[in-house]
Amino acid sequence: MNHDSNVASRLALWGIALLGAAALAGPAHAQSRVSRAPNAAALTVDVWTNKEEGGVYRPGEGMRIFFRPSEDAFVLLYNVDTDGFVHLIYPYGPNDPERVEGAAPIRFPPVAIPTIS
């Protein structure tokens, strides 16, 4: 599998993880019930990177991921490496909020992280 398809696979898995996490945005205990008003809009999450669609990342080049839920949600961002191991990457730091505001874009990482090639 080449590097370009690895990046595309990882990005797709991040989007799926974000949607799965957003779907679980309700209360954590089983006795709580969350009901929506009839015809309420479904939760959606927009996910994009710092490159145009089809952009190619080179080894050692940094990637920024942006996401924006349509409403307030608890968000988890995962990286699935080439060996299939899953790593939680957001929230990671003590200042990363678990619950994010709807319609507010979030950038990950929030600051540039140096890469090692």
Image (spheres, rainbow, N blue to C red):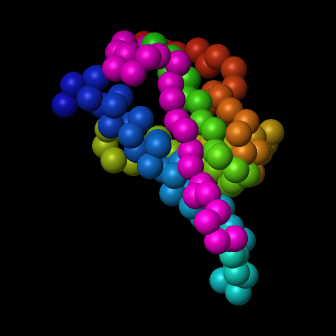
Residue 24 covered by magenta stretch: no
Specify the farthest residue to the front: 39
Q: Is residue 37 above or below residue 102?
A: below
- Of 100 and 108, nearer the camera is 100
- Left or right of 104? Residue 12 is left
Task: Say if residue 96 shows up in the picture.
Answer: yes
Residue 56 covered by magenta stretch: yes
Residue at 19%, 31% in the rendered image: 1
- The percent position of residue 60, horizontal first and vertical second, equals 43, 14
* Quadrant hosting residue 107: top right
- Of 42 and 32, nearer the camera is 42
- Left or right of 72? Residue 4 is left
Magenta: main secondary structure equals: loop
Q: Which residues are magenta?
A: 37-60
- The percent position of residue 102, horizontal first and vertical second, equals 72, 45
Residue at 51%, 52% in the rendered image: 19
Q: Is residue 93 above or below residue 5?
A: below
- The percent position of residue 2, horizontal first and vertical second, equals 21, 25
- Of 18 and 82, nearer the camera is 18
Residue at 56%, 45% in the rendered image: 45
* Quadrant hosting residue 108: top right
- Of 39 and 8, nearer the camera is 39
Task: Say if residue 88 shows up in the picture.
Answer: no
Specify the farthest residue to the left: 1
* Quadrant hosting residue 112: top right
Residue at 52%, 36% in the rendered image: 47
